Amino acid sequence: MRVAPPDNHLARHARLRAELSAASLDTLLVTSLPNIAYLTGLFASTAALIVGSNGLHLIVDGRYLGSAQLRQRDLPGMQIVLVPPAGSFEETVAGELLAASNGRAGFEADHLTVRQHQDLAGRLARSGATTHLEGTQGLVERLRAVKDDWELATLKDAATRLSDAAKCIIPKALAGMAEREVAGIIEAQLRRVGFDKPAFDTIVAAGPNSAVPHYRAGGRRLSEGDLVVMDFGGMLDGYAVDLTRTITVGRPRERERQLLEQVAAAQAAAFAAIGIGKAATAVDAAARRALEGAGLGDAFSHGTGHGLGLEIHERPRVGRWRADLADEALQAGMVFTLEPGAYLAGWGGARIEDDVVVTSGGAEWLTDVPRLL
Ligand code: ZN
Ligand code: ZN
């Protein structure tokens, strides 16, 4: 697995430290594993990271010591703290946090359980230290939303591979197969083009099942006249890409052909609405307006897209405007999907999904596959 060069990691640390000082925090306890991977290049199932003004402390247990030491070669400023074999993870984290902070220590409110927070606060209080815990939200996630050069190169590479996998799906050859067999064929293609693993459970939804946006893949056999939604993605070097095509088994009838064209037109409208400084919700609104104009407003039951990166769903949120959620202004280097769909219960549905990057000129497609296969 390839990881970003040291300079990219150091630039991420510098951006995060600027966020911390703007929030008057002297340290941040990072407990989100994707955030730890972003800042250190270590992909672990258990780890914690303390980012202070003068250093990084990566807390791991014995299972990840070797991997952490490899990362330390790239990032010599990062100290590794090993949880003692007979010690507790929580106790080690609390001890490191006390040593690193004597003021306001941030924690990730979205990634610490109530129990973990109570435990940590209790340990700090009992120590008599002046360290004070402050909940934060999205400090690292906001940085992750804007991809650096290495991430963009990785996502472009992954999107090209995903497009190659998609081009090998030949509708004619799939007739008569069960949805889950088709899912198996798609996942074998993902491995063939070099993905480490699928980014999520592959969706193959045929006939009436295509009207269920989050259907997975079951036993229905693909039959003449079916609309088939195929939604799949892959992970490459820790990064996720995501693509959907809707095919028809046999020649599409007029109604199916029209539905596919309307969904493709909504996707094109969303793409045209992308620009630096524009609201992410305006991209959703453009797709929604196009489908409403086609009489399919009620049939479009989800958001237009989602950010892609170390997680399959991350910032920016490209959905309907909501008073309780911050509307994100698009920035160059943001990568997200455009996946409008229309679902008519009991009959069928269509979704078309591609990945894009925001650029100075507007946007560029990362995936490249004919939309109407
Ligand atoms: Zn998808
Ligand atoms: Zn998606």
Image (cartoon, rainbow, N blue to C red):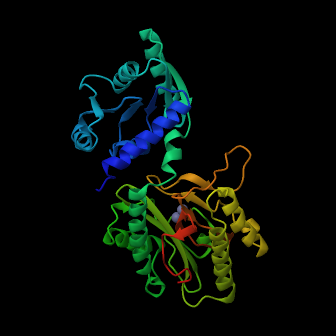
Residue at x-position 48% and y-position 65%: 242
Residue at x-position 44% and y-position 84%: 170
Query: Quick one: which residue is furthest to the front in this view?
Result: 360
Residue 68 x %, y % = 26, 40
Q: Quadrant of residue 194?
A: bottom left
Q: Quadrant of residue 180?
A: bottom left
Left or right, 140 with reference to 168: right
Q: Quadrant of the N terminus?
A: bottom left
Residue at x-position 45% and y-position 59%: 200
Judge by depth and name the residue closer to the eye, 175 or 262.
262
**Residue 157, can we see it?**
yes
Residue at x-position 53% and y-position 45%: 142
Query: Quick one: which residue is furthest to the bottom in this view?
Result: 251
**Residue 319, can we see it?**
no
* Callout count: 0
Quadrant containing ligand 2 reads bottom right
Residue 87 x %, y % = 28, 22
Judge by depth and name the residue closer to the eye, 173 or 316.
316
Left or right, 234 with reference to 360: left
Judge by depth and name the residue closer to the eye, 7 or 223.
7
Left or right, 262 with reference to 336: right
Q: Is residue 35 above or below residue 370?
A: above
Residue 90 x %, y % = 38, 24
Q: Is residue 154 above or below residue 367?
A: above
Residue 217 x %, y % = 49, 67
Judge by depth and name the residue closer to the eye, 151 or 93.
151
